[in-house]
Amino acid sequence: MEKKHDEQFQTLARNLYLLLSQRYNVDKGLFSATALGNLTAYLGRPNNKQISNDDYNKLINIKRSLDEIAKENTISEQELSDLINLYNYFKNMDKDKYSKVSELELLFRKLSMQSKDAIINENEFNDFKEYMHIKRPIEEIFEDMLVNHLQKEKKGILFIVGNVGDGKSHILSYMMKKHSKIFMDYNIKIHNDATETDSPTTTALETMKKILKPFTDDNIDNQDTDRLIVAINLGVLTNLIEELKREGSFNAIVNFLEQSQILSSRDISEEGDSRFKVISFTEQTNFILVDGKIKSNFYEEVINRIYTPSPDNPFYIAYQHDVENGMDKLLHVNYEYMMRKDFQKSIIYLLVRAEIEFKTIISTRSLFNFFYDICMPRDDKSNYDSYLPYLLFQNAGRSELLTLISTLDPIRNQTRAIDAVTVELYQASDTTKKVSELLADESKNFDRIFQSFKDMQEQFNNFINTYLRIKFLINYEDGLFDNVLFDKYLAFYSTVQNGGQVDELFELVNESFFKWNGDSGFDGVIIKNPGRGRVKVLVEINLDPIDNFISGTGIGLKFKNNNNYYEVEIDYRCFEILTKLNKGYFLKEEDRQIAIKFDVFVGNVINSASVMNKNILLDLNTREKYELKKNMRKITLLRGGQ
């Protein structure tokens, strides 16, 4: 029976070879496994591709099976069935489909920041760009400020503050189009780039002062009409405030900006001069927590605009047209993966996690580019590295966002469950068959990815990585992966967001505080002079928790010591370091840089602590303590300081 399978396979493979040779008008000589391999390479060549990568892989697998028969090994019923399906597929397919222009590809190129047709162009809006515009909460704030502030005030400034690439220019251009009549009728001036100069001989700050001249202390109360919108980055604003202070004639603006708390981690204050308003992108987040679970209307809306199967979605319409024309490019495969709700949910989780872990601002522009990058392979000659799981996690360097996402790659998890499945796959006689068993009903959806690994034992690491990434995208909460620490941080964040107090986090910060400069071994004291040296100065500190609050994606904590108040922001990466520190981890210099706000907090508390009348010295070798007392002009050293 097995011999008969081999003969049927050889006959059908010969018929397939003749069919392809005739259909594509290619002559590679008499049929053989080598001739089939040469024909496949010709049809799949990068500069004139006539078959898809998937078709290429299937034909190569046929060639490999023929090689096995030549070695007197038998082929399986599944291999024969696959060949029958492949023959029927080529018999009925449109041979010109890969030379046709893909409508979906043309649309996707508009998502790329590198494209001249990119959607995000601050200077214009067309129907397609109107469709792709995503309304964000900050847009409603902007609209309210425009209509109820600038329109009503004879003199007024609206400051739009943020960081590079966070969408200030985009939302400004959208509002200028939507409310063009207001901008025109009320002569609202725009200064969209606070880093630009009006001449080669003046600095950006000098240009800003010229623009703000109608709002000097001498001019602000005159009867002239002046309405202005200034889009400015946070760092430039800091320098501007200092410059205006030195100038001394912009006190109204300076007082307002300082009272607004725009440079602090607190919420913006609504108090101050009513002629000025400020909108901050820096404290905006793209997510909320509902019952401790991540929810992002913004990310969901962007995904829906591109991937939802709707007759109103131009991307989906383009995808359908391509499918009807017989197209089956890698872009179409990746697009189909992104239409899956489980993949969408996992990618939203990744985006929010990147936002929280790295305090990054993900703008609409970078998000469109992100979806272009994870769906559009760089070329059509690749295999497993052209599919979404690889493009998502192993594409560092292609964009700043993908570089961050690469650090969240599920293969970085070190769990017993992952070790067990790795051993199971490594020991399997047929890894492709074993991964099909592990994926169960889902295996057929990813077969084309794993087919590219067939007979490639040297690619085992990439094979297991691909499996883990697929499992993560199907369900990021799968027991294979360890998200415990991040989930704990989310729980703290949710508690504070809902008005509760995070006693456990206060305790973690308190314990970490006393270990930050090294563990003295004594309660209630912290080392003031870390580093080398036998003798350490100890400072008595008593941190009392006062309050906690949300600060962007971080958690702000307020403490009291000796009638002085201190605030520190604990973001996720700082939380991660403090957690490790309390489990015996030895701090590195790079950890102090990551947790720089905590490092500054420790220094501020130590330096302002009341130690003038009592200093404790610790000899690290003998563990002896000495109390250094200063009384009038007399200094005494006593052994056994308490």
Image (cartoon, helix red, strand yellow):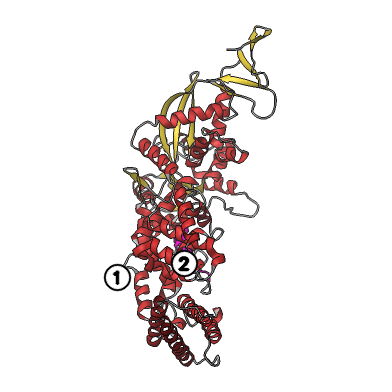
- Left or right: where 561 falls relative to 302: right
Picture layout, residue 15 above or below residue 536:
below
Q: Quadrant of residue 82?
A: bottom left
- Left or right: where 473 falls relative to 253: left
Task: Give residue 399's position: percent from left, percent from top.
Answer: 53, 59
Q: Quick one: label 2, few (<14), some, or many (20+) residues within 10 Å?
A: few
Q: Quick one: label 1, few (<14), some, or many (20+) residues within 10 Å?
A: few
Picture layout, residue 468 above or below residue 238:
below
Q: Distance between the residues labelled 1 and 2?
A: 43 Å
Front-most of residues 242 and 459:
459
* Residue at the spot 49% in from the left edge and 44% down from the top edge: 214
Task: Give residue 639's position: percent from left, percent from top.
Answer: 65, 10
Q: Quadrant of the C terminus?
A: top right
Determine which residue is flagged by label 1.
311
- Left or right: where 197 falls relative to 453: right
Task: Give residue 112's position: percent from left, percent from top.
Answer: 48, 65
Front-most of residues 476 and 609:
476
In the structure shown, which secondary structural element does the residue marked by tag 2 occupy? loop
Determine which residue is flagged by label 2.
430
- Left or right: where 610 falls relative to 313: right
Taking the view exactly as shown, the residue that stands out farthest to the right is 533
Front-most of residues 543 and 414:
414
Picture layout, residue 33 above or below residue 317:
below
Residue 548 visible to the viewer: yes
Identity of the amino acid at label 2? Asp
Give the foreground label among 1 and 2: 2
* Residue at the spot 34% in from the left edge and 53% down from the top edge: 297
Q: Quadrant of residue 46?
A: bottom right
Is 67 contained in the magenta span?
A: no
Identity of the amino acid at label 1? Pro
Residue bounds of the magenta highlight: 366-378
Q: Main secondary structure of the magenta part?
A: helix
